[in-house]
Image: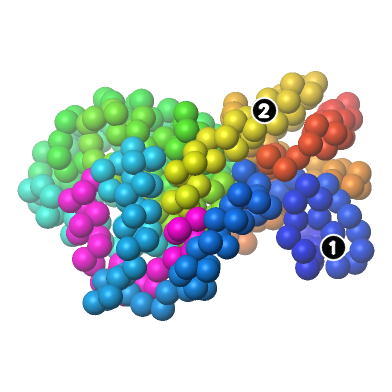
Amino acid sequence: MKTFQTDKLPGRTVHTVDGDEYLWFSGTDYLGMGHDEIFRSFLDEGIDHYGLHFGSSRNNTLRLGIYEETETMLAKWIGSKSALLVSSGVWAGQCVMKFIDYVVFTSAASRSIQNHYAPKVHPALWGNERKLCYDPWSHWAQAVVQEISESPKDTAHIICTDAIGSPIVEAFDFSIFSKLPSRKNIWIVVDESHTLGVYGKSANGLYKSIAALGKFNVIMVSSLNKALGIPAGVIACNSQTADMIRKSAWFSGASPSAPAYAYALKKLLEVNHYKAKSALLASNIAYFAKCLKSSDLFQSVPGHPVFCSEGSALFETLLSNGIMASCFSYPSVDDAPVTRIAVSTLHQKEDLDRLAEVCNQFIC
């Protein structure tokens, strides 16, 4: 697929270096935080107080209190007992996956560990023993429940899955895991990179609803650099697990996120800004969905800002009509390209009207 270059941050529109302008319906800045003035003001305060970065281990002799202050507030917002800030969402996942065997063996008596990787689970949750699965998510989940239920009680199980399908959007029904036996050695690791900031009453994701099933331990990992606009990642879990991860070489040896962004995140949570932004996003999503003559064109999930179509035909049609979506192989170069449209809080009704007009013409 053709690629484009720009030297400006896209918002409602994007200007390419070739001088062309398009309506921009791509990326993962769902809440429009890249252009948010309240966010900018908090970030400026953070830079004034903490500087541009903190070149140190989080476990060094001298520690910046803003990290733990923000982690406490972030955990309260997510609904977990503890939260850890790390440099990115991918590292949040890999930090957990590199250390989880130790966590599992330490937390409950187990003879062995069996991993269960969901179809198309994000590379952030890949481990060394990953086996590919091409079944529908629901079939995979049912098989996992049956396999665990029939397994010896001293076999620990680690279930790794995204919270929502990506790049093809698909809703997952986690209630199926309520059928799991109640054992201390069953763990679910969930990547919420495309739901945190978008789903939940306060835009706080799915952690609380998954943990409420009560049959297993839950670890949530997520990028904060999508809907929330913070170049960092988070690990949300119980306090015992967080303490073990905090003491690990994988956590101690990694550079932290910039403290100014941690400060901005804390302030944004204090004023409940993400909840207000997610309400605006929900309004834009509902408006666009209402303007579509048919829902058959897209694979989408009600309330989620991403609309997908397999192949490149829709992408090319949109592009020829002054609208830039995305269409590329993800997460690997060997994957089939997907046309992906992302609605954000930055879009105005006339933008959504134009997008729907072109999509409706494409259907006809």
Quadrant containing the C terminus is: top right
Q: Is residue 295 left or right of residue 180?
A: right
Q: Nearer the viewer, residue 322 or 344?
A: 344
Q: For label 2, count other residues whose C-alpha is less than 10 Å away and answer few (under 14), some (14-19) or many (20+).
A: few
Residue 36 x %, y %: 65, 50
Task: Verify whether residue 274 appears in magenta.
Answer: no
Asked where in the image residue 217 lies, by quadrant, the reply is top left
Q: Secondary structure at mark 1?
A: loop
Judge whether residue 219 can be spotted in this image: no
Image quarter in which the N terminus is found: bottom right
In magenta stretch: residue 240: yes
What residue lies at 44% left-to-right and 51% top-to-bottom? 266
Residue 283 is tagged as: 2
Report the predominant secondary structure element of the magenta stretch: helix
Disc 1 marks a residue whose amino acid type is Thr
Q: Where is residue 285 shown, x and y percent of the image?
A: 68, 30
User: Number of marks in the image?
Assistant: 2
Span shown in magenta: 238-264
Q: Position of residue 237 (x, y in %)?
A: 28, 46
Q: CA distance from mark 2 to mark 1?
A: 29 Å
Quick check: marks 2 and 1 in contact, CB under 8 Å? no
* 56 in relation to 223, above or below: below
Q: Which mark is residue 16?
A: 1
Q: Is residue 260 visible?
A: yes
Q: Nearer the viewer, mark 2 or mark 1?
A: 2
Q: Relative to 213, is 350 on the left or the right?
A: right
Q: Amino acid at mark 2?
A: Ser
Quick one: label 1, few (<14), some, or many (20+) residues within 10 Å?
A: some
